[in-house]
Amino acid sequence: MSEEWQYQIRINLSDLAAAAAREQLEDPSLVPLRRILAKHQVDLVCQYDAFAHYVDEAKREGREDDPLYKWTKATIEDPEKKEKYIKSFTVYSGGEQVYDKALADSLEADLQPLVGQGVVTKLSKLDTNPENSPQVPRKYR
């Protein structure tokens, strides 16, 4: 039996666009991106901000021994990784970071023309197949 994977769209933004998107500014350069997000009724979430939120939540809940907590905390505290993840955004649908293939394909098709046009620097479509998912590095387990 074939499993149905769910999908996620991630985009990297230019430095200026990432700062504007994180602050939710009405920057004119983001209009084409905002139109696509509105068309699909989805939201952008900065990966760095999502990581920081996870670390705060895990700490409040006493999960500091969890390997994912340790890895995520180390990631947001590393200046090079912070620089990387502060420009990386995940598209959420209905508050969820994964969704069906049809939505992911449609988002990917609509976002692709923005890549390399000054705002979106990279576009990726990921799936939930565990074989394709990075695992927490051994040193945090």
Image (cartoon, rainbow, N blue to C red):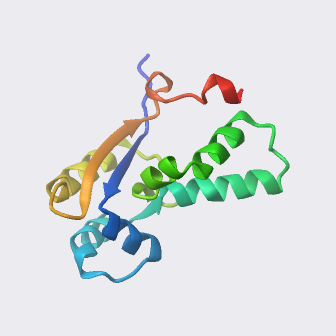
Give x and y (percent) for residue 14. 29, 62
Relative horizontal placement of residue 90, taking residue 135 as reference (left or right): left
Question: In the rendered view, would you say 54 is above or below 21?
Answer: above
- Quarter the C terminus occupies: top right
* Residue closest to the eye, 118 or 95: 118
Residue occupying image coordinates x 31% and y 43%: 124
Residue occupying image coordinates x 46% and y 21%: 131
Q: Most extreme residue toward the right, as rendered?
A: 62
* Residue closest to the eye, 52 or 131: 52
* Residue 64: quadrant of the picture: top right
* Residue closest to the eye, 103 or 22: 22
Relative horizontal placement of residue 136, taking residue 21 as reference (left or right): right
* Residue 44: quadrant of the picture: bottom left
Question: In the rendered view, would you say 96 is above or below 43?
Answer: above
Residue occupying image coordinates x 67% and y 25%: 139
* Residue closest to the eye, 118 or 34: 118
Q: Most extreme residue toward the top, as rendered?
A: 1
Residue occupying image coordinates x 43% and y 32%: 5
Relative horizontal placement of residue 71, taking residue 60 as reference (left or right): left
Give x and y (percent) for residue 4. 42, 30
Relative horizontal placement of residue 31, taking residue 60 as reference (left or right): left
Give x and y (percent) for residue 140. 69, 30
